Structure formats: structure tokens, C-alpha cells
Image (spheres, coloured by chain):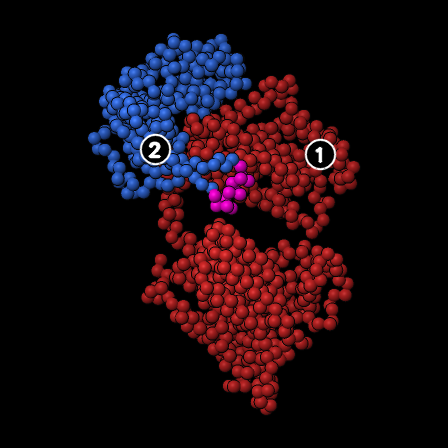
Chain colours: A blue, B red
Amino acid sequence: MNLPTISNILANPLSSSDPDPVIQLMGVSVRYRVPRERLGTFKEYMIRWVQRRVLYDEFLALKDVNLEVRRGEVFGLVGSNGAGKSTLLKVVARILRPTLGRVIVNGKVAPLLELGAGFHPELTGRENIYLYGALLGFDRSEMDRKYEQIVDFAELHQFIDAPLRTYSSGMTARLGFSVATANEPGILIVDEILSVGDEAFQQKSSAKIREFKEKGTTILMVSHNSSAIQANCQRAAWLDHGIIRGIGTPDEVLKEYRENRVVERAV
Amino acid sequence: MKFNALFSSEPKLLKIWLLYFLFSSSIAALVQLLIIPHFFPGWNSTFGLLNNGDSPTFHLLAVNLAGKIQTLGWSAWVLWPSGQGTSGIAGAIYALTTPSPLVLIPLNAALHATSGILVISILELFIKNRSITFWGGTLFVALPSAMIWYAQIHKDTYTIPGSLMFIWGWAMLARLDTWRSRKILAAVCLVFFGAGMIWLMRPYQVEILQLLAGLSALGLLALYIFWLARKKWNFLAFLIACAVTLGLVAILTPFVKNTPLTNQTLSDLRPVPGKPLISDWQPETWLPAFFENKVRSISEDRENYINVGGMSGIDVDVHFRNFRDVIMYMPRALQIGFLAPFPNIWFGSGSAPETTFMRKEIVFEMLAIYLGLAALLVLFWRFYRDPSFWLVVYLCACMIVSYALVVVNIGTLVRFRFGFLILLVSVGVSGFADWYLPERENLQDLLRKITRSMREINTPEPVYDSANHIHPALEELKSVFRYRFLIFQLVQRDILTRYKRSVLGVAWTMLNPLGMMIILSLVFSSIFASATPAYPVFLLGGLLGWNFFAQGTNASMYSMVWGGSLLHRIFIPRSTFVFSAIVTALVNLALSLVPLLLVTVIMQVPIRWSILFLPVPMLLLACFSLGLGLMLSTLAIYYPDVVEMYQIILTGWFYLTPVIYPIKIIPSYLLFIVQLNPMYYLINLYRLPLYDGRMPTAGEFLPAVAYALGYLILGWIIFTSKSDEFAYHI
């Protein structure tokens, strides 16, 4: 893993126009090294290594991305599949450390990536709330304080002591959303949600996100649904093959994105 | 660091040689003219030669020879008067000049300086910085125990540069990945002249060297085939190299055949042929005869040294009677060869005042040697890809061991092994300096970061900056501390889900080892009953400790490989999974203490206060399992089949650890294998407070602590240095 050098950082100075950036990406590149053939086992790997034939394809998921998100802003990311949107979110959420460049995040990140990933089917709803809360980095006292609110919001009072395997998928998703949004995060990362549960709950969750927005939470969201971006975001960026092709108001960016996508298809 | 302040630019080898020459000749002159005759007249025999050593004898033989030459002419000259080559050469010089050891000083100093230069040349195979290799060579030249040969008369003056040439030549052959004919020629010359110089003094050493050279040649041939396969060489180069390598082994044969074996009476000697010292030798039928003979002659040499006696004898009661005795003594020989004289004899007295003085002096040398060898261990990690490094270490180590097998007198051993051991120490010291000096800035920087982050450990506002990279090992420690509630939750999840859908619930944790115990007790108690009273308690104690270890390490791998999908989705300190696996196992271990106590009471083993000590071995066992679990899960992330491989290893390991059998049944010559096994100490420590009902001794306690903490630290460093890449691999 390469650390950024001084010159690397100097080449991407902080823009002085921005008073209070919450997320800063400076010359961020993420390189995946994919073995050309899948070498699943140690034995295979050793054989290939002796033959000097472990070949890698290098694949840049992000190329020299510079981005700033200000405090309280709702920032959208658009781009086709494989453009690097999820990778960018992972870099911000600390899941991946960038191969090159530097990321600075000021504040607690609450990821809404794939809700309920840490749930265990044998545990009850109550036990799962605490487990998921711990996975998100909260401690016991914080969870004790928020517990009632979470159950209220998820509307799961009757089932809270039943094992999670008895829940419907909608109920599980509701529980996940409730835990993830229970503590007011500094930064909320939203990846293709807002389609959780039934229509009533969808409205409820949208309202919750709006509430956060009003309280000054920074939101970074990704969607294929351009109307969602247009409706919610103040600014947006268009990501294409790991490169930022445009940053601006959602209208400008989406216009450019649509035009180019059409051209691409024509080619 | 101005290392080369001594020289205006990079020091030339010739200049260094002159410096070493001046140094050793002036020291030798001082010793012979001033120090011994005037300060220690009691030690003086003639001309400043120590009276309690071989030098006066060598001198007298040389004087006799010179007298014969002067009366009978040069036809009277023999190379080995009474078998002593050093006297043959000295005699010739005495005949030409005057019979005083002073005239030998220039020759001795020149040879010693050449040794220093050879050390520098060997070091420069690995280290490119002359100002560092210079200090490596200086260490070799300036160590005071070398005075015994360059300031006196001895054979080592010749054999040491000879051995160094020999080693350098072979190391060069392992460096031919870019083909150069000049290098081949140089290597051939070095090996030939080196062997020649050794042959002049100690012909039997060439015999050992030929054996080692044969083995090196096999290694080199494998290397050459590898290079050929990698297309670094063409076929012609390969053929030439193979021929040269095998030729170099064959070239030693005439040296071996022409041994001037006569009746020798000095401690630097060889048994008299035709008079076997061992009458009750037990031959092994399956061994080739020539090999058997070599082993036998080594054993006879050892008898000879035991008969010579001396104050600093070590293991003089060990006699070899067959091939197996020799093999079984190898680990001990390794220990003696590298590390003797051990601290317990540093302050004793020798056979004479001068040897007592030497013992005091050698303390400093031994400390330097220990440090250098420790540095050498670190260097394996740096040079492990370099075949010439392996070759140098192999040749030196084998020579040291073969001397340690034979020479029971430590004073003599120190002299014989000097060239090989100090070469390794020089490699260690210079290699470490070469790594450390450029890294010093970085290390200091790291230290500053560590102190800073210690202060920041509880900062409330989480700020993530990917460039603010304190050392990953510390960063992980910090975040694990923040996520301690998660570890608790994961443990709770594992324990709850394990028992939720079973009728007996938590009772299984206790029933499982009890069942195992009953079965194994039925099978084995009749076998081990005599050695172990209350066998079920003995067994259950060990079994619980082992189960904890096996369960903990296994679970840490599984939880990383299968639970690792979470690492894709949210940020979690990666080690929480391993931590929770070990803590879960620890909870199970604590629960299973209930049946253990029950069985103890039923079997009427008295319960003593020492039982309160039990948490300590449990904690140590947990540290060890955590360390190993971290290493294994790192491997398992990259190669999932490590999980399967580990199951096999675990089974073998179980039977190698005294869990179901007592340590007493292991024959003493196999004990060292058990003593290398960390689990032996840890299981034993766990069993002591309850089964034996006593506190551990320091000898039982300290190795367990060292293994547990060592594995924990190593595992932590390995895990955290790779953990940033995990999300890319799962």
C-alpha cells in the first residue's frame, strides 16, 4: 500500500474557497489487483509462484479523484454500473484504504450500505439491535438510550423478542434502517435505499433523512434513479470508469450524464 | 553518521589491508616484546610466547628444523615436522633469518589482515556500503581472542583465511544468476587456494569441507536447474557451471588423500591411525561404509579430546558409540558451537592464570557474539531470497557444529570456530547496521507518532485521515479498544446461538470434554496408570486446555473467512473477529472448569490453594491462541485452503503434545522436540495448579510467558500489516 508523498499532497491543495469541508478526497486512486486466473488455494499459488506465473491484472476502480463535500450538504453520485461509485463510498466509509492519495473525513460516518448485513437469524430482534449497533461502533449506554426509539420507529413492538428468522424481509430491512439511523450521524452514506419496506415506511424513512438534512447531517448518496438525485441533492458528481467527469448542480451533471450515455450507446 | 571520516572517500581495500596489517603487526610486537615479558613475566616461556599453550612447542619444532637445514642443507626441510605444518613454514623462515618468533610477525600480520579483507569481500556480497562492511571486517580483525594466533605461533593464522577463501568461492557460485566467466574463474581459484591453505595446517579439515562441499554442490545444482528453467541461463552456461561445481568437489580429493598423519601430541591433533580409541563401536548396517567411517573417526577424535583434558571441558561424559548418538547430540552441539562458553563458566578459573584471564576477556566477546547472532536471525528476513547468504550460513554453521561435536575443550573450540562464527557475527552486525542506519529517521518518526497517538487514544470526535498513518499495529489497537462493546456482542452472539436450539444448552460445553475424557480414560488409563495416578484428572486438565486452543484458533479462521463479508460493508476493526473467537473459547474454557473440578473431587485429588493461580495459565493460553489465530486468519484470507491444512496439522500437533500421555514416557533424546513445542509449556502450566497442586517453577513458567507474548506480538504485527488489504481479498 503506497502512502501519499508530500508532492502528492501539494499537487492537490485544499481549495481555500471551501470553509468547512467534511469529506475531502485528494488524488484518490484505488487499484484492485486481480489475479488473472483465480488462485483459490495455497497449493495452487505455490505451484504458480515457483513457475513465476502469478499474473495480475491491475484495475483502477478510482483514478485520481478529487472531491469535497461541505458540511450539511446532500451530495449525489451518478454513473453507470462499474463506474466506481460503490468504491468511492467504501473509501469514505473507511472500508478500503486508498492505494494513492488521501481521504479526510470529519465526523462519524453511518453507512447505510446493505442494511442488516450483520444480523443473525437465530437471535431475537432485541439482541440483533444491540449486535448491529455494536457493529456500527456504538457502545452499550448509547444503545440503551436509543433502544425504545429504534423499536418505535421500526414498528416491531410485538415481535421484538422473536428470533429474526421469523421476520419478513420487509421487517428485517425496517429494523436495519432504524438502528442505522437511530444515532444522529455526522455523515450518512446512502446507497440505493429509500426502497425499504412498504410504501408507508418508505415515506417515513424519507422523512427521517430529510430530518437529518435539516439538522445539518451531511449526506452522500448514490442512485441510478436520477429523479431522486435531482429532488434531494444540492450538488452531484458524475463518475465514469473511475474518473470524475463533472461536478456541479444536479441538473447540469445529470444533463451531461444523459447526453454522454446516449453517445456511448450509439457508439 | 560520518562513518568514513577515517577516509576521504570510499576506502580502498588496499588501504584497509595496510591498516589491518599495521594494527596486527604492532599488537603482535607489543605482546611479544613488551606485554608478556615485562607485565606478565610469569606467563612467559621464551620470546614472549605463552608458556601454557601450543606456541612454544611449535616454536621449538621450528628451531630444530632450522638447525637441521643449516647443518644438512635444504634437503632436510620437511613441511610437516612432527605433523605440524606451522612449524615447517616457521622453520624455513627461521633458517633464512634468525630463530625468533619476531620474524614471523610480518607474515602473521599479513595473513590476519588478509582475513579481514576476505571478511569484507564476503560481506559485500550482501551489503553494498563499504563504510559499513569496513566495520564488519574490523570487528573480525580486532577481537582480542585472535591475538592467540597472530601474536603467537599457531595454525589458525593460515586456516582462517583459507576457510574464508573457501566460503567466498562457494558463495560466488551461488551468485551467478548473471553469468560472468571471470567470476567462475575467481571462484575456482578461491576454493582451490583456500583448501590448500587449510591442507597445509589441518589436512583433516579438508575432509570435512569436502563432505560439506558435496552437499553445497547438490544445492547449487538445484539452483542452476532453477535458473535454467527461469531462462536466466542458456544451456551451455548451465553445463559449464555444473561441471565447475562438481569439479570443485573433486579437486579436493588429492588434498584429502595426502594427509601427513604422524604421531601428534598436541591438542591440535588427530587420533593415531591403527589404534582405535573406541573398541565397542556399534555399526549401523544400513549406512554406507565410507560414511560410517567418517562418523566413527569423528567419535574417535572426540575421545581423543576428552583424553587430553583441560579445565574448560564441556560434556566430557558424553561418548559416541553409534551413529544415533552423534545425531542425537546435534542440537546440543549446535548450542555449544554457537553459544559456548555459557555464562556459568565466565567467572570460573582456568587451568592457568593466563587462561583465567582469557575467560574474563571472553565475556565481552561473547556478549558481542550473542548480539551479532541475534541480528543475524533478523537478517534471514532480509536476505532469505539470496542463495549465497544461505550458502555462507550453511557452511559456517556446519563447520561450527562439526567442531563442537569433536572438541570438548572450549578454549580450543573458541579458536577453531573463530573464522566461521565471527564471520556470521560480522554478517549479522553489518547487515543490521546497513538496514538500521537508513531506517533510523523512520523509526524515530514512528516513535514520535506512537507517543502522540497514545495521548489521543480517547479523542471524542472521530476524524479519519488516510494519510495520517500511525503504525497499523497501533491504529488497530486503538480502534479495537473503541469497539470493545462489539467484541462483547459477538461473543454473546456466538454463545447464545450455539445453545439456542439445543435441549441441554450450555451443558454441552461441559458434557463434551467429559465424554471425551471417559472414552480416552477407558482406553489409556491402563497404559499410563503407573506413571500418572488419577489419570482422568490428568487427561481432562490437558484436554480442556488443548480444546480451548484448537477451538479458538479454528474459530478465528472461520470467523474471518466467513464472517469477513461484513468487512466489505462497514468499517470494523478487523481483529474484532479474532478477538471474539478467542474470548468465546475462553468463556467455554471457564465453563468447563466445573466438570474439571467435579472430576478432581471424585478422583480424590486434593485441591490446594495453587488453584487460585489457574487464571494466569488460562490467560497465557489465550494470548498464545490469539497470536496464532491472527497469523492463521491472515493466511486464510489469502488462501482459504489453509483452513483445511490446519486441521491436519492440528491432529499431528495434538499427538506431539503431552496431552493424553505424560512427559515421562518420552525418551530423553527426544525431549528437545517436545521442548520446542510451545503447547507443551502452556498445557503443562494449565495442568500444574490442579493436578500437581503446586505453583510452577521459573523454568516452567518463563518459557510459557515468552511463547505466549512472542506469538501474540508477532501475530499482531503480521495481521495488522496486512489488514488494510483484507477488504480487497475477501
Q: Residue sitting at 71 percent across and 41 percent down?
A: B662
Question: Which quadrant holds residue A69?
Answer: top left
Which residue is label 2 attached to?
Answer: A62
Q: Residue sitting at 23 percent across and 33 percent down?
A: A15
Asked whether B455 or A64 is in front, the reply is A64
Which residue is label 1 attached to?
Answer: B537
Q: Dot 1 lies on which element?
A: helix
Q: Where is residue A19 in the image (x, y as percent from the top left)?
A: 23, 29
Asked whether A152 or B323 is in front, the reply is B323
Q: Where is residue B468 in the image (x, y as percent from the top left)?
A: 35, 38
Question: Which quadrant holds residue B320?
Answer: bottom right
Q: Where is residue B444 in the image (x, y as percent from the top left)?
A: 38, 47
Is A51 contained in the magenta span?
yes
Q: Dot 2 lies on which element?
A: strand
Q: Give the range drawn in magenta.
A: A41-53
Per the rendering, the mark at residue B370 is: none
Q: Is residue B272 left or right of residue A130?
A: right
Is A157 contained in the magenta span?
no
